[in-house]
């Protein structure tokens, strides 16, 4: 259902499993062992990992959600020719709410890979999966109300794919048990197709 591997011009997304991403690799990147993790997760709905067991449990949860078709999660790696080619650069996710005909793309990108517009390239790939492979009606992108960096990045690719900004939802989510506002952007399948989203350079190598 979900593609194991996705390639864009500069990125390779690989299904996040224990045999592809060692739990210690995730732990080193997503715990306090990383000096940039607090900045990377400041506006995300999860906290830095506390133990290696937490990393193992998180990957196991991703594997379970994949099997149950609730969420697909991929490891992001820059392709050959990019600075840091082959390194673990973060994760890309696609949360599926089938009863709402809705998909929610997600991303955690490590700071050394910021500023390259990888977020938009990853969005191109996940929108292709959501609309072409899964035939979902709408993709929605919620952003923490204070996250100006992500707001600008999302605004660019949503506009490019024919979507719209829907507004600020007050106290829509929580962060460390505190209420948080969310900006919400959305793209409908028909808008994406009219904007020629299907023509973006995305490949699924395992399809042959």
Image (cartoon, helix red, strand yellow):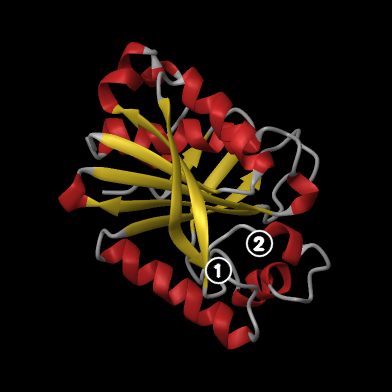
In the picture, residue 9 is in which quadrant?
Answer: top right
Label 1 element class: loop
48 displayed left or right of 65: right
Task: Give the side of residue 41 with respect to residue 187, left or right.
Answer: right
Residue 158 screen position, x and y as percent: 48, 27
> Where's residue 66, x and y in %?
33, 62
Whether residue 57 can be seen here: yes
Q: Residue at x 47, y 66 (%)?
A: 17
x 60%, y 76%: residue? 23
- Report how far apart the C-alphas of labels 1 and 2 lie in the structure: 7 Å
Q: Is residue 194 left or right of residue 203?
A: left
Judging from the image, what secondary structure is the residue with disc 2 in? Answer: loop
Residue 6: mark in rendering: none
For this orientation, the residue located farthest to the front is: 170
Judging depth in this view, the residue of 78 and 96 nearest the camera is 96
Q: Is residue 117 above or below residue 97?
A: above
| Badge 2 density bin: few <14, some 14–19, many ≥20, Cα 10 Å | some
Q: Quadrant where the C terminus lies?
A: top left
Residue at x 63% of width, y 78% of height: 49
Q: Please, is residue 13 above or below residue 161 in the view?
A: below
Q: Identify the image quadrant of residue 130.
A: top left
Residue in the foreground of this view, choosing between 70 and 206: 70
Q: Is residue 49 left or right of residue 56?
A: right
User: x, y percentage for residue 157?
Assistant: 53, 26
Q: Read off the residue under disc 2.
A: 41
Tag 1–tag 2 contact (CB < 8 Å): yes
| Residue with the mark numbered 1 | 46
């Amino acid at each position: 259902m979900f593609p194991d591997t996705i390639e864009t011009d500069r990125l390779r997304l690989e299904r996040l499993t224990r045999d592809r991403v060692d739990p210690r690799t995730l732990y080193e990147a997503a715990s306090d062992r990383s000096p940039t993790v607090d900045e990377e997760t400041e506006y995300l709905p999860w906290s830095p990992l506390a133990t290696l067991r937490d990393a193992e449990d998180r990957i196991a949860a991703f594997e379970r959600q994949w099997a149950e078709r609730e969420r697909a999660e991929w490891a992001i790696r820059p392709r050959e020719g990019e600075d840091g080619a082959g390194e673990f650069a973060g994760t890309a996710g696609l949360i599926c709410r089938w009863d709402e005909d809705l998909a929610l793309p997600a991303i955690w990108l490590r700071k050394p890979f910021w500023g390259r517009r990888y977020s938009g390239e990853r969005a191109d790939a996940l929108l292709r999966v959501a609309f072409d492979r899964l035939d979902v009606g709408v993709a929605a992108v919620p952003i923490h109300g204070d996250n100006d960096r992500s707001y600008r990045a999302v605004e660019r690719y949503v506009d490019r794919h024919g979507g719209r900004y829907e507004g600020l939802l007050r106290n829509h989510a929580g962060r460390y048990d505190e209420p948080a506002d969310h900006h919400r952007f959305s793209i409908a399948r028909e808008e994406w197709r009219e904007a020629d989203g299907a023509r973006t350079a995305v490949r699924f190598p395992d399809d042959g």
